Image (spheres, rainbow, N blue to C red):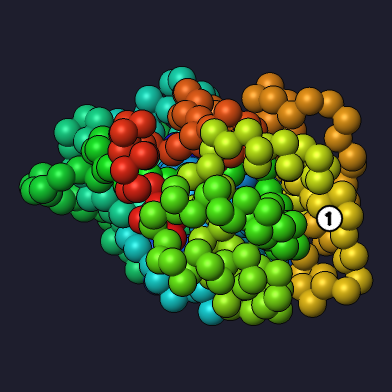
Amino acid sequence: MDESLQSFLFRQQMLFAGKLDPKKVITRNGMWYLSPYAHQEVQHIFHRLDDSILLEAAEVGEPIRACQDGIFTSSDDYCMSLWSIFFNNGKQDSRMINKTKIRFCQTCVNEAIFEYGHGYFKHQWVRNTWCYLHELPLRHLTRASYKHAIEDVKEILAGGIPINEVCTQTRPSGAVESLSVNNSKELELLFAVHAPYCLGRLLANWLTLNFSKLSEVAEFLTKVEWAFLPWNLLNLPIDSNDYSQALRKLNALIVSFRRNSSLNEYISEHVEYVKVFVSPRGQLSEVMMLPKLRDCQSCAKNKSCSFLKFEYNEIKEEIDLQFLFHHSSSFKRYAIDQGQISLTGDYMWMPFRINSFLSEEDLESGELMEFVL
């Protein structure tokens, strides 16, 4: 899917809203909003579509992102855009500041009409001024009014060319972002299995039990950080910034110990897995690992817990790649987008590599730790 969010919102309203009034898509002076959304009067027409389809429309052109807090990232973090775009409460006008010209390549539009039966605006055109597919300048609309922009967009979608449009005559210099290959050696990680903050306390117990055996492999931590990490995880308030920082160090250790059989045995003995239903209507799902023994009512973070706020089902099956593909929506998007699975360890709770050119030697050398920390 390469249709821009602006185009998707406009076309759906044109087809199903009855009266076409894309006031949160097109500005009063005839431009695209850079952060468009469905206003309350038309939200119902998008609710007929599955959350997975809406997510693809909302995230078009966006690469799979790393998990900022690693395994402790909230399981619905990747689909929060659905709330603001399709299920908002009408309080999004603070987003309606940035705008851009309505640009298009008529050759691309005509090809889409021939192939799909309808034209659309590509997401690359929102920020580019050149069609790198046909090596042509993008045209853009010039009539500065809301009403005229609607008429012109409808004409473009039908294969026509509005009277008042102009195009850039020269090809932009420099690298083409939309066609460039990512050769960065920065390692990004995707955790297909999530965990609530309280799991940090459980893993701190394992660190304490294995403290003397593991200190030599934690070279990316100072001796003071290593000595105080288990204590911080066991004693700091679970909703404090210091606890969050300790969790990020723990994430680095988890990946560093990816081949440690003792850690996997400990997790297998003390953790259970559940399938949580995320997204506005609970149509997307993720896999979470939870301590088997937990006292949720005593947790300071229970009101915003990434587990307690979702409905869930217990998992009895073995957690393998096939299971993750069918039950973790974020992992499925990752697998389809990447076309291959890049493991960092032997167990499914370990992260997967995203767009990484790092070798095993690079991983062992500590470059991974610089990113995670």
Q: Residue at x 75, y 46 (%)?
A: 288
Vertical comparison of 86 with 182: above or below: below
Read off the residue under disc 1.
Answer: 310
The local secondary structure at tag 1 comes to: loop
Residue 291: where, in percent of width, then height? 81, 52
Q: Residue at x 78, y 25 (%)?
A: 318
- Specify whether 272 is left or right of 189: right
Query: Mark 1: few, some, or many residues within 10 Å (few <14, many ≥20)?
Result: some
The amino acid beneath tag 1 is Phe
- Specify whether 113 is left or right of 42: left
Q: Nearer the viewer, residue 353 or 263?
A: 263
Residue 360: where, in percent of width, then height? 36, 31
Vertical comparison of 325 with 246: above or below: above
**Quadrant location of residue 38?**
bottom right
Residue 224: where, in percent of width, then height? 46, 72
Q: Nearer the viewer, residue 211 or 75?
A: 211
Say if residue 32 shows up in the picture: no
Quadrant in which the C terminus is drawn: bottom left
